[in-house]
Image (tube, grey):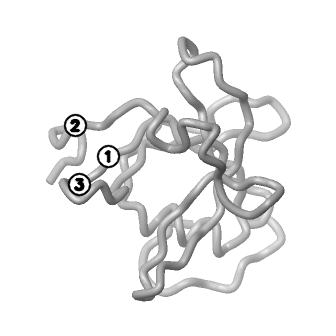
Amino acid sequence: MTYQGARARPSVTEQRRVFAVTAAHWDAQDQLTHVRWVEVVAASNLDAGPATVVPLSELVDALHDGAQVRVVYPEALGLPVGLTLETVEHPDGHETVALASPMGTETHASPGLHGLARLDAAALGT
């Protein structure tokens, strides 16, 4: 399923999809706009296909559809593996994502999503 358009009711198979986010792009206002992600076969932990760069809205739609989305930091940072993302709604109504934690959203003790590899504007294909 492609995460474009209106949100569809998740099926059982949709809820079992797992994605790994490996890089991100922030705009001039420090808002996350795009991510590089790949679907992962949970049983083998292998990529199900090539990584693609998508708008943040597709990641948000995947989370709403029940998919698990995990963050993969560059190895050199030595950060934990398997941290997951959750949606966060801002007061103005737009949605973004943050690291999930037992207390709700990411803590300031972690580098958060800014620890991800950076996507430059050329990678966005716009």
Q: Position of residue 99 (x, y in %)?
A: 63, 52
Identify the residue shown where x is 53% and y is 78%.
89
Q: Compute the Cα span from label 2 to label 3.
A: 10 Å
| Residue contact between numbered discs 1 and 3, judged by CB atoms under 8 Å | yes
Question: Which residue reaches farthest top?
Answer: 76
Question: What is the secondary structure assignment of the residue under circle 1?
Answer: strand
Check the picture and name the quadrant holding the N terminus. bottom right
Mark 2 or 3: the one toward you: 3
* Residue bearing mark 1: 25
Assign the C terminus to one quadrant of the image: bottom left
Q: Which mark is residue 27?
A: 3
Q: Nearer the viewer, residue 99 or 126?
A: 99
Looking at numbered disc 1 in the image, what kind of residue is underneath it?
His
Amino acid at pointer 2: Asp
* Residue contact between numbered discs 2 and 1, judged by CB atoms under 8 Å: yes
Q: Secondary structure at mark 3?
A: loop
Residue under the image location 70 percent in, 49 percent down? 84
Q: Callout 3 environment at 10 Å: few (<14), some (14 to 19), or many (20+)?
A: few
Identified by mark 3, the residue type is: Asp
Q: Earlier in the sequence, mark 2 or mark 1?
A: 1
Residue that label 2 marks: 120
